[in-house]
Amino acid sequence: MASKRAYPSGAEKRKKKKSEEDKLSQSKGSLLKYFGRGGPVQPDVSASVGIPELSSPPTDREAPGQSAPPADSQAPGPSSTPANSSSPIDRQAPGQSAPPADSQASGPSSPPSDRQTPGASYPPADSRAPRPAFGQPIDPPERNLALRGSTNTLHQQHNGNFLKEVELLAKFDPVMKKHIDRVESGQFSHSSYLGNEIQNELIASISGKILDTVVAEIKRSKYYSVILDCTPDLSHQERMSVIIRIVRMDDDEAPEIKEHFLGFLVASQTTGLGLSSLILNGLEELNIPFDDCRGKSYDNGANMKGRNKGVQARLLEKNLRALFVPCGAHTLNLVVADAAKGSTDAVIYFGNIQKLYNLFSVAPQKWAILKDRVTLTLKSWSETRWESRINSIEAVRYQAPNIREALLEVRDKATDALTKVEAQALAEEVGSYRFHICTVVWYDILHQVNHISKLLQSATMQLDVAVDLLMKAKTSLTRFRDTGFSAAQASAKDICDEMNVEAVLKEKRLRSTRKHFAYEDPDEPIRDAMKRLEIMFFNVVVDTTTESLKERFESLVEMRSRFGVLRYFKELDGEALSNQCDELCSTLSTEDEKDIDGKELALEISNLPSLPSSDMTALQLLSHIHKKQLK
């Protein structure tokens, strides 16, 4: 009699392995559908069985030989794909095919919703209560959370958001729970689909699908503008961010300005030639034609806006209709920087502001003294964003007496002579009339500049609105020059009275200017300290700001004049309207083709019905035309 085999044969091993792979493919399908759709899959079965949609997790799962229902029956999530496309991360095992939407999955480990698995109970559909809010799985991509943690082990504290969501999903999903039990028991001899590689693949798949959707929307809009900026990262590589700005025009929705971030490009060369080649190659890889680009915007660096070899000049050679508009926020930042460099008193003032922050922030004990007396703490100013220095001035503007008391306390408690001297000098400076006049003047200027800077950074900002804001800022500065200094004196005097110090401007020793030629007359010195501060500080700062606004935004004003006919056509007569339409046609034309016909545009504008308002922005006018179907 033959003895019974103690070990399984090769055929039995292969059969067992194939069975495990089939069961794992079911779990993998559920896992990928969950994270690929941004939440549990909820097939629409209300039409076939007559029950309302539920928020509880579905009970039907994929079985061997079957795959997920079509994408139009999936519940959309933050990373969901369009309804008429299939997700690239909904995988199928070899030989699987998608069943119809109304078909039910079957198999030993994936019962349909109208059956019960042994050992599990399913209440009727109408008695299921919605899952509580704290039981809803969060979506890491939507909240910009990292998926991976410091460990890849289940049920560990720092295993990352991905595995934590898998653990949470297992509490409601019997298939996922069975998969996790097998992983923890060590029954798998192959990948568990919970490691780093599958996480990276999920991220790449979702990112690729989102990018495909964005590119498709850009192509539907046809014309676009490109926004570029370069910055080094933590690995000391120069990276260029690419943003595409479009106007989305759908038949059933109002026109909308949208900005899409396409990603970072590693810039090995920061010359105009290197950066222009980089962006052209990037657009070509995405199959976005550069001939449809009608605008470009970046900072005021020589390699970017250079007229001969800059990026804007090289891209203009490729496309004459890609008009350059400098970054408004960066240009406004340079305006304030120009004003600060023009006055010695301004440079000294910001140096004292930074000294205040350095004195208190060097030790926790000193910072505690400051916090006991103020509600707005001191801020360190930025070297690259001048308009943000309002944060460092605001605390001094409204809490100068408290800061001075904190300085005196630091002086009394300090043990080293250097700290005592520095605290005493800063206390005298903060208590001076000159310091508070400079504080009020700079706060008023930076407050207005910072407000305009925030508006210019809006994704929906329009060219005509931006120019109007800048013109209003220039007008406001002109009025400020007439009354600002006297108002600053009054505010500074109130601060000095609150600190019980004399509001007197200390005289400084007058320096005589050497004559370089015998025929020169000596300059008449300004002996009045207040008059000298007004001329050498206030007038210089305000005049430099006003003039810099005019010079640095000249290209923006010129661009509005080219397209001004689209907004101010009601103010033009027939001949002027025709001339400006022809000029706009010439701007948007090349030797081979043109975007518009000047004569047809003038005729359409002349026949345009009355508008609801005479002061409409370009986007409001476009929305009105779309609403009235005047296209």
Image (cartoon, helix red, strand yellow):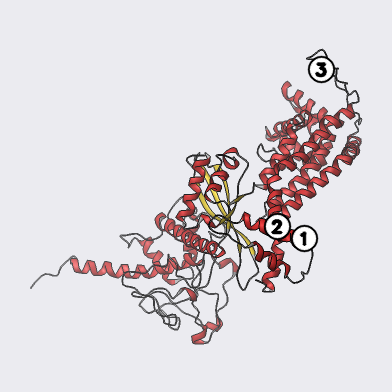
x, y (%) of residue 354? 72, 33
Q: Residue visible at 68% across and 59% down?
A: 581
Give the image quarter of residue 364.
top right
Q: CA distance from mark 3 to mark 2?
A: 54 Å
Helix, strand or loop at label 1? It is loop
Residue that badge 1 annotates: 572
Q: Is residue 557 above or below residue 402?
A: below
Say which quadrant the C terminus sits in.
bottom right
Task: Look at label 3 and name its amino acid.
Answer: Thr
Residue that badge 2 annotates: 580
Q: Nearer the viewer, mark 3 or mark 2?
A: 2
Say which quadrant the N terminus sits in.
bottom left
Label 2 crowd (10 A; few <14 / some 14-19 / many >=20): many
Q: CA distance from mark 3 to mark 1?
A: 56 Å
Helix, strand or loop at label 2? It is helix
Q: Is residue 557 above or below residue 369?
A: below
Task: Look at label 2 and name its amino acid.
Answer: Gln
x, y (%) of residue 382? 67, 38
Residue that badge 3 annotates: 513
Sequence-earlier tag: 3 or 1? 3
